[in-house]
Image: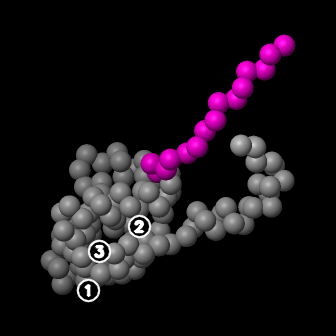
């Protein structure tokens, strides 16, 4: 396994940046949701919550449908904006969707590594 060169990283800059901004569709019991990957700081914020971190993650990473839509929130009787996640998705599904969001952002990704051979003098 050869190390990537600086030149390769520079040449791949646009592709790398585009990959980090990809949106993806997640099938839920309520239909297909389009999601965006969370930023590192957002993940830290969500994981710091004492409860509701999965709902918070799903709510803020959903691009479509617009879960913050006032008519949608009112139709489901939401008190807090993130309540819509509980109203639309099954309880076990919320954590599965949150996990999928994290996986699509690269968290929990299996990374290949090789030990360098010792250099003998």
In the image, is residue 29 part of the stretch drawn in magenta? no
In the image, is residue 114 part of the stretch drawn in magenta? yes
Q: CA distance from mark 1 to mark 2?
A: 19 Å
Which residues fall within the magenta stretch? 107-121
Check the picture and name the quadrant holding the N terminus: top right
Q: Quadrant of residue 71?
A: bottom left
Where in the figure is residue 79, as x and y percent of width and height?
18, 70
11 with respect to 53 (left or right): right
Element under disc 1: helix
Residue found at the very far top of the displayed protein? 121
Residue shown at the point (64%, 35%) measured from the top left: 114
Element under disc 3: strand
Where in the figure is residue 91, as x and y percent of width and height?
18, 63
Where in the figure is residue 46, as x and y percent of width and height?
36, 52
Q: Quadrant of residue 100?
A: bottom left
Check the picture and name the quadrant holding the C terminus: top right
Residue 53 numbered tag: none
Q: Which residue is mark 2?
A: 61
96 with respect to 23 (left or right): left
Where in the figure is residue 36, as x and y percent of width and height?
47, 68
Q: Is residue 30 above or below residue 79?
A: below
Q: Which residue is mark 3?
A: 28
Prevalent SS, magenta region:
loop
Which is more N-terminal, label 1 or label 3? Answer: 3
Q: Which residue is mark 1?
A: 71
12 with respect to 43 (left or right): right
């Amino acid at each position: 396994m050869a190390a990537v060169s600086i030149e390769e990283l520079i040449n791949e800059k646009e592709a790398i940046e585009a990959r980090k901004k990809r949106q993806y569709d997640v099938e839920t019991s309520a239909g297909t949701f389009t999601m965006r990957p969370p930023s590192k700081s957002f993940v830290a914020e969500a994981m710091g919550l004492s409860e509701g971190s999965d709902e918070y993650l799903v709510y803020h990473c959903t691009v479509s449908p617009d879960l913050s839509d006032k008519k949608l929130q009112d139709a489901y009787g939401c008190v807090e904006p993130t309540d819509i996640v509980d109203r639309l998705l099954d309880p076990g599904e919320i954590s599965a969707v949150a996990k999928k969001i994290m996986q699509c952002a690269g968290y929990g990704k299996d990374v290949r590594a090789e030990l360098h051979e010792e250099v003998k003098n």
